[in-house]
Amino acid sequence: MGHSSPDRAAERAYLPRAAPPTNHGHTTAAWVTVVLVLIGATVSSLAVMGALVWLFWVGMGIVVIGLIAGRVLKMLGFGQPAAQDAAELHGH
């Protein structure tokens, strides 16, 4: 693809430097958030099928608790480091 022809200029690829190794979000904070949100969504879905309004709101409460728990765990250091923190960690 990078070959040039008489009627067309060569194609150039401008690629960024390779990203430092990361864990792609596989952290305690991420897993806790995902598990609680899935449980809450499942409870709410079952409540909709059974026409149980109170159970729907219980499920939504579990979702909110999951989101808050994930944020708190990230603030406590159990989440993915911010881009600036990761760069400092890898010496960039």
Image: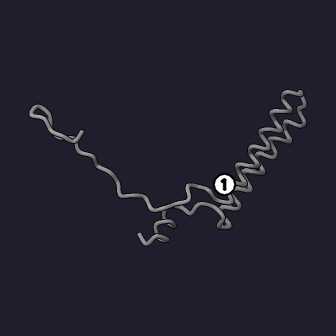
Question: In the image, residue 90 lies at what x, y percent?
Answer: 46, 70
**Rendered residue at 68%/60% (across/down):** 28
- Residue 16: quarter of image: bottom left
In which quadrant of the rendered image does the N terminus lie? top left
Q: Is residue 15 left or right of residue 51?
A: left
Q: Is residue 80 left or right of residue 71?
A: left
Question: In the image, residue 2 lies at what x, y percent?
Answer: 22, 42
**Looking at numbered disc 1 in the image, what kind of residue is underneath it?**
Ala
The residue at which mark 1 appears reads as: 30
Seen as rendered, the residue at the extreme left is: 6
Q: Is residue 12 left or right of residue 70?
A: left
Question: In the image, residue 80 lies at what x, y percent?
Answer: 59, 60
**Rendered residue at 73%/54% (across/down):** 32
Q: Is label 1 in a helix, a strand or a loop?
A: helix
Q: Is 25 located above or below residue 59 in the figure? A: below
Total labels drawn: 1
Q: Nearer the viewer, residue 55 or 5?
A: 5
- Residue 81: quarter of image: bottom right
Question: In the image, residue 48 lies at what x, y percent?
Answer: 84, 29
**Rendered residue at 70%/56% (across/down):** 70
Q: How is the image coloured?
A: one colour
**Rendered residue at 76%/45% (across/down):** 63
Q: Is 72 located above or below residue 35 in the figure? A: below
Q: Is residue 56 left or right of residue 30?
A: right
